[in-house]
Amino acid sequence: MRFVGIRTCAAALLLLGTVFSARVAMALPVVTFYNNRAAWDLAVSSQTLINFEGIVADNTFVDFGPDENIDGVRFAEAPGFNPGQLIVSGFNGGLSGAPYNSALVMSGNSGALTADLTPLRANFTAIGGFFGNIQTTDAASQLTLVGTTGVLDVRVVTAGDMGQGNPEVFLGYTVIGDTIDTMTISNGDFEGLDDFVYGQAIPEPATLAVGSVLVILLAPRRRRAA
């Protein structure tokens, strides 16, 4: 009986520690950066893709002004650049310096490009896409992630080279403990975005650990009842 009591107390302490750690983690958002689409896919569920196809005719482009709502997401040339230009280029539109074999969205005027999830009025915790500079090869850009609690991450990245029709750089995030408002890429040269995705981050293993501890707590009681 005493051995069972010791086990129960130890398990209870472990549970309290786990719950406390989980609460601390929730108070401080856990932000994970990805530059690999396959790794991002493994960390995300319920994905939605916006590939910009069918918005404008092939071999053409349209200037939507400072921003445009596309499938519920607001894409915009970030404030501070004048005049604002948000351009959607169709398949082989040619604005990227060479015909590019996909439709894409881009900022004009060397501006910053923002993807804004807030019009969806839902709490999404994962975001990403294939980013590239339109007129400069391997130009350094700044990537900024903003959540409901404020700026979550700022880093310097090297985007792909859409000027050669080959943007191979995936940039994305998952967040635990906050929700995502916007992601902005700036300081490059005519930023471009293809195959934009968003969804829900899969909860970290620490959350599942609480359930495992509860099973341990219940085990002695089951044996006593038997």
Image (tube, rainbow, N blue to C red):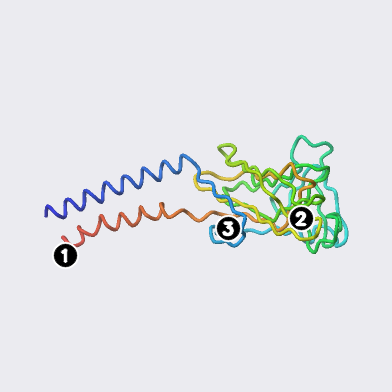
The x and y percentages for residue 138 are: 74, 51
Q: Position of residue 199 (x, y in %)?
A: 59, 55
Q: Position of residue 66 (x, y in %)?
A: 80, 42
Task: Please tell me whether mark 2 or mark 3 is closer to you in this view.
Answer: 2
- How far across and how far down the image is residue 197, in percent? 65, 56
> In the picture provided, is 22 more to the left or to the right than 47?
left
Q: Which three-letter amino acid code belongs to the residue tagged 2?
A: Asp
| Amino acid carrying mark 1 in the image | Ala
Where, quadrant-wise, is the N terminus in this rendering?
Answer: bottom left
* SS label for mark 3: helix
- Name the residue beneath numbered marker 1: 226
Q: Is residue 49 left or right of residue 29?
A: right
Give the residue at x 16% y 65%: 226
- Residue closer to the observer: 103 or 109: 109
Q: Amino acid at mark 3?
A: Trp
Disc 2 crowd, CA 10 A, few/some/many (<14, 14-19, 20+):
many
Q: Which residue is mark 2?
A: 161
Image quarter for residue 40? bottom right
- Report whether 225 appears left or right of 127: left
Q: Which residue is mark 3?
A: 40
User: Residue 148, labelled with which disc?
Assistant: none
Question: Secondary structure under badge 2?
Answer: strand
